[in-house]
Image (cartoon, grey):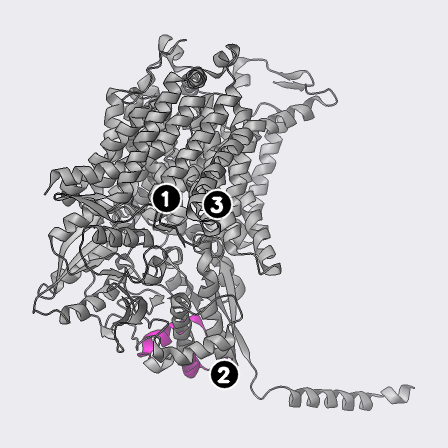
Amino acid sequence: MNVLQIAIDGMLAGLVYGLVALAFVVIFRASRIVNLAQGQLVLVGAYVMGTLMSLLPLGAALAAALAASVLVGIVVERFVFRPLIGQPVFAIVMASIGLLILLQGLVQLIWGAQTRPFAQIFPEGAWRLDTLVINRRLLIGALITFAAVEALRWFFLKTRAGLRLAAVAEDHYVALSLGVSVRGATRIAWALGAFLSTVAAMILLSGNVLGLQASEIGLRALPVALLGGLESLRGALLAGLIVGLGEAFAAQYLDRLTEGAMSQIFPFLLMILVLLIRPQGLFGWKVIERL
Amino acid sequence: MSLALPSGVHFASHAEELRLLRTRPQRAALLLLFVALAVFPVVASNYLIGLAISASITLIAVVGLQITIGMAGLLNLGQSAFVGVGAFTAASLYANHGLPMLPCIVLAGLASGLVSIFFALPALRIKGLYLALTTIAAQVMFPIVVLRLPESWFGGAAGIGIDQPRLLGTAVDTPAAFYGVAVGVAALMLLLAFNLQRSHVGLVFRALRDNDIASSVLGVELGRYKIMAFFAGALFAGVAGGLYAFYIRYVTTDQFTIWLSIWYVGMLIVGGLGSPLGAVFGTLAITALQEAVHAGGTRAMNLLPALSGGTIFAMTNVLLGAAIIFMLIKEPHGLAHRWRILKTAYRIWPYPRG
Amino acid sequence: MKQLLSRRHLATLAAGVFAALALGTPAHAQTTYNVPISLDYTGPFANVMDSWHAGQQAVFDWWNDTRGKQLGVKLAMKTYDMRYDASQVARTWPQILADDKPIVFLGMGTPDLVSLMKRLPADKVPMIMGTAMVGPLWTPNGWHFSYRPTYSQEFAGLFAHLQKQLPEKRALRIGTVSTQGLAGYVDQVNGVVALAKTYPDRFAVVSSQWVDNTPVSVTNQIREMLQAKPDVILVGTNTAQVVATLKAVKELGANVPVVTSSHNGLTEVAKAVSMEDQDGSFSVFAFAPSMDPSLDQIRQIFDKYNKSKGTWGITAAQTAGQALLTVAAIERAIAAVGPTKLTGQAVYDALLAAPFGAENFHGLIKSVRFTKEAPFPTEDLAVKAVTAKGGQLVPVSKDWMPVPELAKW
């Protein structure tokens, strides 16, 4: 059994989780909003894209879909989260739960429950490197993810606008008192988050069947984001790699002992274990709580 | 004797203030409620009685959630899994081991509580949202583990069926009979929850929710009480699960999904996190909303054949999600808070309730 | 004036009216019986309900128009939206019993089974299902019936056919793809494993892979499976897994056919993987595929009586079979107790009394014989399958493929 091959396939799959987790982290990093509805953002992005692709040629449809996703992000921010600026994290988590239910229902309301084909955006098949087989779609997706992380890091750490967002991520009121526009920050966060979710949808569903269950990826992405640390961009990526590897090796070696149970549970067990040792995730900000 | 005056309710002793029913009008209202509940199965159709039973079962689970999330501030996104644990335990004990119905339900609650301790242990180190992760893990692991356990325990892939629920020798398979059991258990659990809220443990929970570091400074054993909060919530869930098992009479893992867990949280948010009354309001409001949408939708479908059924199912989700967001923005304390304001306004009328 | 309305005049008038009425009514008085039907208009399967109900409604209307008129019986369909939710079924059932006094109930899926399995023997109303069963519901002395056996048995029929066509005399090597945590999916694999244990010289399960319900990629698992050199890969779960499996197989440069069921069949998969790319894969189920030429008659019935937006396809064929079984049982019950005395017990007895020959089903189903041991026929089972060939969906064989005998696992 080629361990390297298993590792590569695991990592490529894990990077898709990482991309969705990245969207989650971006939103949190820029606005201190925990978005449990991440899977639903992917779902909305996918359906919008599906519709646009049947109306416009591929390139135009992609651009339009990304623009539409930014719009969706801004609308969600304006009507759901702006009224909740300054509220405790708890209330915001609840709001995202409400958003989760709302978006899932809205997608079914507008597009119906029928599954539909999703156009092929990325090339199918695999590249062969010696004896190694590397899935084309997932490799391109991985490269996009790496590029996104580096671009976002540059934005958050090297530009003025991005640095200001760090203040918002710490505390809304403090940021406001320092003259940082929390509204602007939330808007940027959601635009970016929705954008990345749509990109993830593209990678996930290219050439696949599109149905309402596409939002299930959100369930996988949340633990990945928590494992990496809610504020860390590279952490989301690394956590995705780790989870992907973990799943692959658990499937390979542990599934035969537990008849398939381990590869499903393993990511969660791993995360709980890591969180017990490092409660803020691998690279999350260590928050010093004060009375 | 407490006095209800426009300037407020006056108590003569601390014990009076702690009472659940403080004024005479409150006691009268409760009596009326009991009478109404007793008369209901006589006048209502079988479907409505069934609806009331389902609502009571959901109510118990949501009240449990209120203890964990509302009283203690610990986010629990896996309540449906704990309901499932209770359901399977009750079904297994009744069908495979022949225990009578009530002990089955009690043991179901305890079993669920014990299972929750395992998932609450990380609470000693992990906080807030990260802790929610372990509850999601519970929800994901539940079906996998149950399906893999030996068939003689929980039926494996088959699930467990209950032939005929018998309470103290008499069969309770008619809607009216089961209604009595369900509402009775729900009332009891609600009483327990209200008592918990005003007890010492309830106060500690409130301290935990408000600021856990401060409470630890004041000498509260955080770990112990956090686990207790989970245990209590799961206990309620287990009892709800036990009732569910006897009502549906067949349990399979597919009946307990993460979507249900999310709906429970949604109901709680709409009703109000602050007290078990919020759980009651939330459950009733959302159940009513669901039925209204389905009834209205079916009628609309008959009038406009162009309307597809998928629309109606989606509508309930859209409305619930919108309701949650609306409540959080406009009335974060939920319907229960509105109710309290209404009562106060009534009591001090014609003075403004500013 | 009073003389015009004398008593004698009134009596004659009354006699005349009565005579007119008596002559005007049909020779047989018609008795109407209620048949409640469980549907899902507002739950997860709402999108297929049009075609699903169309199959039932066309058959019932046809029967009422032809045989029903002759026998003096009218079957009134009463549809109930059960939202694919066991608690909704449990809530509504007492109402159905009291209001409709049904003689038979047409169930849709697992929620109906789960809620009603324990109640039906006491309530004395048989339930006829429209979907395949799962192993755990293989219980004796039930009042629930399905002409489709378990999914595993349906697969077994195709496996037996394929094994006979192998160039050498050896066991058919089967790989399974399924998901943990979902009882039905796990059971499918258990059944196939039991099949291999019962006939080790004909079938062997060489690899069982477990994937996510909606997997990102199953390449690792399929690679592992290909090591064991399977002849076929069974993916009886959902469309997403079939798509992922087909892609993984192609990516790894292999060419192993995939076997699916009716709900995740090749037409669904064709939304993502073209029929050409599915070449050689199969869909198998216990009724005749909708393009089977032997189904012309039922197709005509459907086209004539269908009033809804539903179309003829696998879904409508499946429920048409369900309805045909129902009316066949009712006809037999009428023969036994007469048209005015039909009860649930009578229909139940009719279902068990004797086999139902294939002529009842217009080619949709082979003959069925129910016994008390199982909710579905356990002997003489047969299936039909379709395969993708040259970009088209074609039936695998003209005749029914027999299913090897399989004991409860």
Q: As shown in the figure, which amino acid type bears the numbered disc 3? A: Val
Question: The magenta stretch spans which residues?
Answer: C331-356
Chain of residue at mark 1? B
Residue A191 vertical placement versus B288 (above, below)? above
Q: As shown in the figure, which amino acid type bears the numbered disc 2? A: Thr
CB atoms of marks 2 and 1 within 8 Å: no
Residue B335 vertical placement versus C180 (above, below)? above
Label 2 sits on residue: C66
Residue A276: quadrant of the picture: top left
Crowdedness near tag 2: few (<14), some (14–19) or many (≥20) residues, C-alpha within 10 Å = few
Residue C315: quadrant of the picture: bottom left
Q: As shown in the figure, which amino acid type bears the numbered disc 1? A: Phe
Label 3 sits on residue: A107
Residue B184 visible in the displayed image: no
Chain of residue at mark 2? C
Left or right of residue B133, residue A246 in this image: left
Q: CA distance from mark 2 to mark 3?
A: 44 Å
Q: CA distance from mark 2 to mark 1?
A: 46 Å
SS label for mark 1: loop
Per the rendering, the mark at residue B256 is 1
Q: Quadrant of the N terminus of chain B?
A: top right
Residue at the location (61% across, 24% down)? Answer: B23
| In front of the other: B90 or A173 | A173
Q: Nearer the viewer, mark 2 or mark 3?
A: 3
| In front of the other: B2 or C46 | C46
Residue A71: % across, % down? 51, 35
Crowdedness near tag 3: few (<14), some (14–19) or many (≥20) residues, C-alpha within 10 Å = some
Residue B217: quadrant of the picture: top left
Residue at the location (46% across, 53% down)? Answer: C83
Q: Is residue C338 magenta?
A: yes
Q: Quadrant of the C terminus of chain B?
A: top right
